[in-house]
Amino acid sequence: MGWILLTLGIFAEIIGTISMKLSEGFTKLIPSISIFVFYGLSLTLVTLSLKKIDISIAYSIWAGLGTATVAVIGFIYFKEHLSLLKVGSIVLIVLGVVGLNLGESAQDEESEMVMPVEKVK
């Protein structure tokens, strides 16, 4: 359930960030309200996901995937310039997220293999 909440939190954060652009500096009412609604929802969902996911993993994935996705949406939807440096940076973000997940998976497997030792009296 933690991963579902985190994923939904990422989507809400992306919508909130896109709403920032659409609000045109808080001059458009609906996008301006959407910023607060979706960022509030995002923070709530990510906070709930922390019951099951380590904060170092959840926050890094939330921030990284949100940033990378918004950069791609900026290029596709808002026709923003996408330089080779931006593409390389997005790739590094995604690789970092993959690395964090692989590291967590390896740690989970390792902890399952360790047998508890009783305290010797």
Image: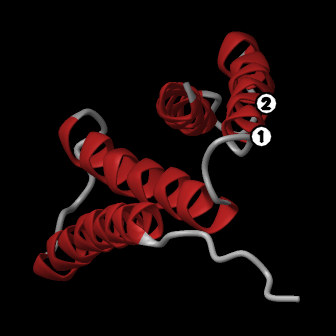
Q: How is the image coloured?
A: secondary structure
- Tell me which residue sits at (38%, 72%) in the image: 110
Quarter of the image where the N terminus is located: top right
Specify the farthest residue to the left: 84
Pick the front one: 48 or 11: 48
Res. 89 image quadrant: bottom left
Q: How busy is the neighbourhood of tag 1: few (under 14 within 10 Å), some, or many (20 plus)?
A: some
Q: How much space separates mark 2 and mark 1, taking CA atoms?
A: 5 Å
The amino acid type, in three-letter code, at marker 2 is: Thr
Q: Position of residue 80 (x, y in %)?
A: 27, 53
Q: Does residue 19 lie above or below 80 as drawn?
A: above
Q: Does residue 97 lie above or below 12 as drawn?
A: below
Pick the front one: 77 or 40: 40
Q: Does residue 90 lie above or below 76 as drawn?
A: below
Q: Which residue is mark 2?
A: 44
Q: Position of residue 29 (x, y in %)?
A: 76, 14
Q: Position of residue 97 (x, y in %)?
A: 34, 64
From the viewer's perspective, tell me whether residue 66 is left or right of residue 42. Answer: left
Q: How busy is the neighbourhood of tag 2: few (under 14 within 10 Å), some, or many (20 plus)?
A: some
Q: Which residue is mark 1?
A: 47
Pick the front one: 94 or 106: 106
Res. 119 image quadrant: bottom right
Check if mark 2's residue and mark 1's residue have beta carbons within 8 Å: yes
- Tell me which residue sits at (47%, 68%) in the image: 111
Quarter of the image where the C terminus is located: bottom right
- Tell me which residue sits at (49%, 25%) in the image: 4
Specify the farthest residue to the top: 30
Q: Does residue 77 lie above or below 95 as drawn?
A: above
